[in-house]
Amino acid sequence: MELDILRQEPAPTEVGSYFVANYPPFSAWSRDHVAAARAALASAPESPPAWAAAGDVPKPAVPPLGLYLHIPFCRKRCKFCYFRVYTDKNAADVDSYMDALAREIALYSAQPRFAGRQFEFVYFGGGTPSFLSSEQLKRLVGRINEHWRWDAAREVTFECEPGTLQKSKLETIRSIGVTRLSLGVEHFDDELLESNGRAHKSKEIYRAWDWVREVGFPQVNIDLIAGMVGESDEKWRFAVDEALKLQPDSLTIYQMELPHNAVFSKEQQASGQRLVATWAEKRAWVDYAFRQFEAAGYVVSSGYTLLKPSPDARFVYRDSLWHGADMVGTGVASFSHVAGVHYQNLDKWEDYIPTVQRGELPIARALPISRHQALIRELILQLKLGSVATQYFDQKFAARVAEDFAEPLRSLQSEGWLDRVNGEIRLTRGGLLKVDELLARFFEPQFRGVRYT
Ligand code: SF4
């Protein structure tokens, strides 16, 4: 029934950003606000973010703290990728980057904002963190731990590309405290993996999977992408079946988009031909996967994820960030959020490394956010979970969500994308499958229709 609503919208996949990762949009961040980021880092751990300083909101507790480490190396560039990654660096280059990363983390460990605080979560992302050898990884972690440890972290996530793994490397990854391994499978069809520029093939997935289970991680996640170029109903059903056979602890499914600068985006713009399925087709594929996994006992935990219920089933990184945690993003082009200020690192290797080597934090652009913007940010991110209780926002931000957002809530409800029950906003399945498309309705007018990144 709900999917019938989606089928009425065969919108093509155009080039441009779709996924909403933050608010206000990145295009609003600027060099002019870098001083605000530095001031946030110099503030005491218990001092409230600027948006809460007015005195008419309850003083927030010191938020959880996370660390993100960007490992920007990949064996090959996927044709849909828009991340800051390098495929041409040699071992000496990798070592100098690791040195810069360790130095940057050492600089952060001395910032007043983090005095006496422990990491609640750590995330090795990329790029491909598993591109690093066991020796490089041990050396990096050894250097970081001279300044900062993550023994108390509730979750340490590590992203892997299947073709970079050996059993001994997985043992090293486990030994540095990783609790959540995320395997970038994306698909099981070799032709499709090849034509989309992935570095691995299906046999490397199955080989890695046996080692992952032998080594034993508390949680293992598999990533899939619905709608890679060349996708079909038959291939997608095969991918979902294969993923189900592996019985991962959680599954993440992205809908293929065509961000600016990806190889496929340039090809589509040059040829004028549509390369990727329509949004309606991609959402129907995600819905199919949701139903198959639900039938096997999994639960849908956001617009992109399913998990197998268990005491370890959690995603601390996501849930902390979406509830306003502080997170230090380290590495080239990384994003941070500290004390109500967003900021991003220098996004070029040639700028990032020398800046850190000089002993400076490599901050390139920033944006301090207002209380209303902090509210919108948490509201739209938490809506991706499928339901939110308005009371949380009303208390934390001294807001009245039902009135402040009456118009978007009314229009989304009348179009069938959400229901409202006893102070709870619940997306319908149709709404959840297209949640990113709906979120701009909550944006302030000046950020609607602007370029997102
Ligand atoms: S593995 Fe991930 S980060 Fe690397 S090129 Fe592919 S999509 Fe980009």
Image (cartoon, rainbow, N blue to C red):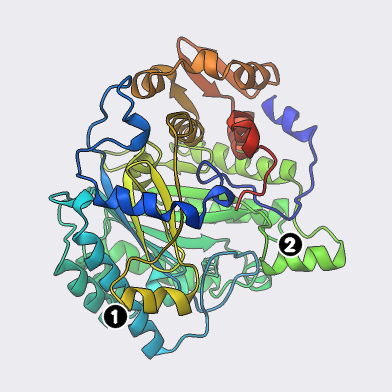
Q: Looking at the rendering, in which quadrant would you find the N terminus?
A: top right
- Locate residue 257 relative to residue 254 in the image: left or right: right
Q: Nearer the viewer, residue 13 or 145?
A: 145
Residue type at the position of mark 1: Gln
Please determine whether, in this image, residue 248 is positioned above or below residue 172. Answer: above
Q: Position of residue 154 (x, y in %)?
A: 22, 47
The residue lying furthest to the right in this view is 272
Pointer 1 local density, CA inside 10 Å: few below 14, some 14–19, many at least 20:
some
Which residue is disc 2 drawn over?
230
Secondary structure at badge 2 equals loop
Nearer to us in this view, 72 or 406 = 406
Query: Foreground residue, 255 or 216?
Result: 255
Q: Is residue 44 left or right of residue 55?
A: left
Spot the residue most to the top.
Answer: 422
Image position of 25 with respect to 190: above or below: above
- Against 411, is 32 above or below? below
Looking at marks 1 and 2 on the same chain, the residue that comes earlier in the sequence is marked by 1
In the figure, 89 relative to 338: above or below? below
Query: Where is residue 93 shown, x and y percent of the image?
Result: 40, 86
Q: Percent from the top left, x then y, of residue 424?
A: 46, 17
Q: Quadrant of residue 156?
A: bottom left
The CA span between labels 1 and 2 is 37 Å
In which quarter of the view is residue 159 placed? bottom left
Q: Residue at x 73, y 41 (%)?
A: 280
Q: Amino acid at mark 2?
A: Gly
Name the residue that disc number 1 marks: 136
Which residue is pictured at 41% across the width and 53% down the height? 221
Residue 393: where, in percent of width, then height? 40, 23
